[in-house]
Amino acid sequence: MKDLEDHFFRHEYGRLVAALSRRVGMRHLEAIEDGVQFALAAALEVWPKSHAPENPSAWLYRVAYNHLVGDWRRTTRRAELVLRLGADAPAGLDEPRVFLTGEVRDDLLRMLFVCCDEALPVESQLVLALKVLCGFDVSEISERLFVSEANVYKRLARARSRLRQLEVQLDDLGSTEVAGRLPAVQSILYVLFTEGHFSSHVDGAIRRELCAEAMRLTEELAAHVVGAVPDTFALLALMHLHLARMPARQDASGGLLLLEEQDRSLWDSKGIATGLTWLARSAQGQEFSRYHAEAGIAAEHCLAPTFAETRWERIVECYELLDRLAPSAMHTLNRAVAVAEWHGPRAGLELLEGLAPPSWFASSYLWAAVLADLHKRAGQTALAERYRAVALESAPSPLVRTALARRLGST
């Protein structure tokens, strides 16, 4: 039952929303989401008692569509309903596709571009896409975007309201609009992969299905004439390099292993080679993005024979570039970790000295865990214990908490 729920909420939710939005219009987004949630709940109730249908996606689509039409029939005159929908009968999922002018061929990727309307603030674009198309709940979005849950709710409400006013259609975008929205789409795919690679979800710190979906959509993007740019190639490189190390990130019981604990013989050498190929391709031209910097960091880890032989000076350099491109307390924190490996824990602490992180970050497990580790290694026991307690208390899942406890130990 739990596997069924995870599968359909993650793999089908966004696709159903995208298909129905294309059929009835984005202005009905909230009603569409209600219909999709109704269909998924019906599947969880009906299928375990009998047999799953031969075409589960089509079954879910029809149930969601019928629920949508049923609600409208109770509040709308028939003539208006026919005008709105164009027909009474639910459409199947096998109807011919109409590509965008820019030839984006995947409904989900198509809707990502629609959600990234320039009329919406970038923050609202990201929240809307993660909630509506990727099936993230508000707490997951809050964790990944480093904002409060109240802020997520506000951004989501504004985005939905704006889309209702715009009455945008999924087939209305041309190549120029697609190109303008590309950076926002890349950001969404990056966050989707990150959530899969290091999840905030309580049931698991690694969610391969999210990584696979993010990579699939990014490959679609890289194959598109507008999306085939160095930034996209660097993003794909980053995904492949992280995914290649995933087999070694968990022990036999599913617990998380720290980088220095991993068996590097389990890393996927073909995946690393693919990532390095994309990274080389991303070096063509003059563009250098945050994805280039992060892929460079991942490449250094993949190429190091052992943890001790890692070229930390190169990683520090990449973090410095990353912090210039996208200034963030998180990037400074990661740079401090690399500096500590290169020059010792006190050097790492010096980099953080005087840094006043945002309130939401100062109380997070990431900030507290790094400070606990550096203070412990520097022999500052009292400070280490204080930050250790915060890190363990605020860890997003039991698996992360266990890994932190092992890393931080007793002080």
Image (tube, rainbow, N blue to C red):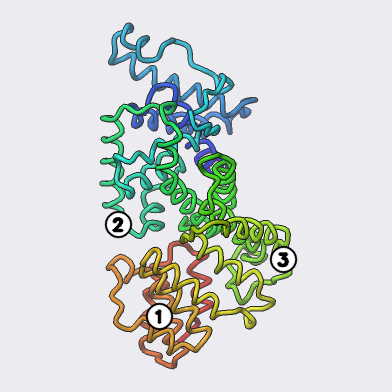
Q: Quadrant of residue 381?
A: bottom left
Distance between mark 3 and mark 2 Cα atoms = 38 Å
Identify the residue at horizontal 54%, vertical 19% (top origin).
92
Q: Secondary structure at mark 3?
A: helix
- Residue 102: image x %, image y %? 50, 32
Which residue is label 3 attached to? 266
Q: In the image shown, does 187 or 73 lie closer to the viewer? A: 187
Which residue is label 2 attached to? 148
Height in image: 329 above or below 124?
below
Q: Give the class, few, some or many, for how many residues have Cα within 10 Å of label 2's Cα (few <14, many ≥20).
A: some
Q: In the image shown, does 343 or 48 lie closer to the viewer? A: 343
Q: Secondary structure at mark 2?
A: loop
Q: Which mark is residue 318?
A: none
Distance between mark 1 and mark 2 Cα atoms = 22 Å
Q: Which mark is residue 371?
A: 1
Q: Quadrant of the C terminus?
A: bottom left
Q: Earlier in the sequence, mark 1 or mark 2?
A: 2
- Residue 94: image x %, image y %? 59, 21
Q: Quadrant of residue 262?
A: bottom right
Q: In the image shown, does 285 or 305 lie closer to the viewer? A: 285
